[in-house]
Amino acid sequence: TGGYGMARGEDGLLLMGTSTLLRNVQDLKAEREGVRQGADPEAVHRSRVASRRLRASMVIFPECLPARKGRKWMKEVRSVTRALGEARDLDVQIEFLQDFEGSAPPEALPGLEAIVRLKRGMREEAQPEVVRWLEDMERKGTLQEMELYLSGEVKRLDGADIRGEATHASGLEHISARIQELLAMEACV
């Protein structure tokens, strides 16, 4: 296991973590075709949200991932989030400008239309990078590998008590450790 490690009796927290990670992986996988087509900005938005949730879950539940593979997976998910972020930023800018056109004075419309065209061109240029990460992850089988591993762990842990005292205590210990890490950075902040 990675991260903090789990003591005996903490299967409930492991089940909660692996279930969360599995759901995030499946959410990201579900949006692949919409992102590949590039026609629906909401597919990019949902994918970016799913990738950010997956990354956050990987940080919160590192013990639910195999140590070496977990680091590799985190790096790949980070690159996905970055590629999606650039595309999403452009989608949001285009949408904002189009909404603004409705209330802009007539003399501003030619300039706004030119900016929208420029942003659409930039978005079209960003699309191949987004598709590249999709193809790269599919070629490597990263999401499939994660889903297979996490599904196995969820199955193995089936029946663990996620509401029990051991899970609660383990969760508090885990949160306390994360808070201590954050507070250790206080001088830097």
Image (cartoon, rainbow, N blue to C red):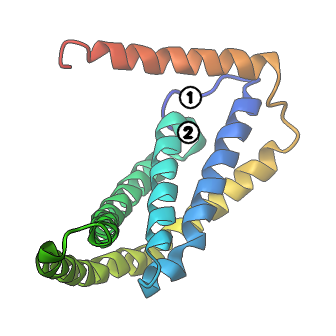
Q: Residues within 10 Å of mark 2 (few under 14, many from 20)?
A: few
- What separation in Å lies between label 2 and label 1 (alpha carbons)? 6 Å
Q: Position of residue 17 (x, y in %)?
A: 65, 40
| Name of the residue lying farthest toward the front | 106
Q: Are marks 2 and 1 in contact (CB under 8 Å)?
A: yes
Q: Looking at the rendering, which quadrant does residue 27 occupy? A: bottom right
Q: Is residue 25 left or right of residue 163?
A: left
* Residue type at the position of mark 1: Gly
Residue at screen point 76% across, 18% down: 166
Q: Is residue 92 above or below residue 158?
A: below
Q: Is residue 73 above or below residue 138?
A: above
Residue at screen point 79% across, 31% down: 162
Residue at screen point 37% across, 19% down: 181
Residue placed most toward the observer, 45 or 160: 45
Which mark, residue 5?
A: 1
Q: Residues within 10 Å of mark 1 (few under 14, many from 20)?
A: some
